[in-house]
Amino acid sequence: MIIDCHAHFDPRLLPAERLVAKLDAAGVDRVALIPAMNDPLPATPERLLAVMRRLSGHAAGRVIVEAVHRALLTPEGELKLSGQVIPIYARPDNEGVARLCAAYPSRFSGWIFLNPRNHPTVLDELERWRAAPGMIGLKLHPHWHDYRTEILGPVLRRAEELGLPVLIHLGFRKRGDFRAICAAYPRLKVICAHAGFPFYRDLWAYRGSCPNLYVDLSSPYIDERLARAAVAAMGPERCLYGTDAPYGFHEADESYDYGAIRGWVERMPVRAAQRDAMLGGTFRELARL
Ligand SMILES: [Zn+2]
């Protein structure tokens, strides 16, 4: 069973019927969808992404990438890109994803997108959406929602209690303190998006001290070389196939290319059973599907 553990639902870019047709054509059985958190973005130039990937590989380079990131955020928490201001949603719409999961229960699962910043009733929101059929875990984005991960305490404690996995896009320094998260919530299943961006190797090195730490292999935040390095360091059993669709990797017709990251996983020098686990088996267990 092929499961994409990290994709976004943005009907402005890819409406539900077209998404299902694309999954059929690509042989992807199930997708765990995240509500969109921003207005559609102009494509990030591949050259810029390549520089970011290289710089993020070590602490000194990360300082530069962080400075660039901070320069792109407005004081209101929106994004300034190519002269445009792109709204980031403080409260992504969980309802649209829940509706889609109810309409296509065999195809879609949903991540509940929570933002604890300025949100005193965030736990109520957690309880509300976890009761909706098909919602399998929590998505957190301290990088763009711009908060220190220490304010996630009550949310992570509850996720650990409930056995809900957490998919987190880590930010820099205190906005991505994965060590503190793993130490405080040892039973919490933590999936770090984009091979552990922005820490990569420094996060993979922590594998031994945190048995419930995983990474997904999604998005142009990484490339095939980094995906392979992640699998070599973390082991295939800690790496999950994900795409970040419909962002990045466009086909000639501008729609999402489901073959790109799948190709990385299929070309990995691992045993067939390990590849199957990366493509869906491990995530199926984590999300109790
Ligand atoms: Zn994403």
Image (cartoon, rainbow, N blue to C red):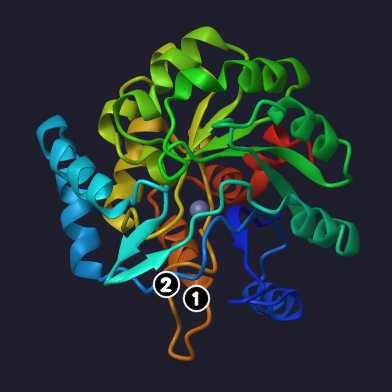
Secondary structure under the numbered disc 1 in the rendered image: loop
Q: What residue type is labelled 1?
A: Asp
Query: Is residue 56 something that shows in the picture?
Result: no
Tell me the crowding category of disc 2: few under 14, some 14 to 19, or many 20 or more residues within 10 angstroms, Cα based: many
Q: Say left or right for 192 vs 125.
A: left
Which residue corresponds to mark 1? 257
Mark 1 to mark 2 CA distance (whole Å): 6 Å
Secondary structure under the numbered disc 2 in the rendered image: loop
Query: Is residue 149 something that shows in the picture?
Result: yes
Please name the residue shown 40% across and 40% down the image.
143
Which residue corresponds to mark 2? 249
Q: In the image, residue 72 lies at what x, y percent?
A: 28, 54
Please name the residue shown 72% across and 28% down the image.
121
Foreground: 286 or 183?
A: 183
Mark 1 in CB contact with mark 2 (< 8 angstroms) = yes
Give the quarter of the figure containing the C terminus.
top right
Q: Say left or right for 183 vs 225.
A: right
Q: What residue type is labelled 2?
A: Phe
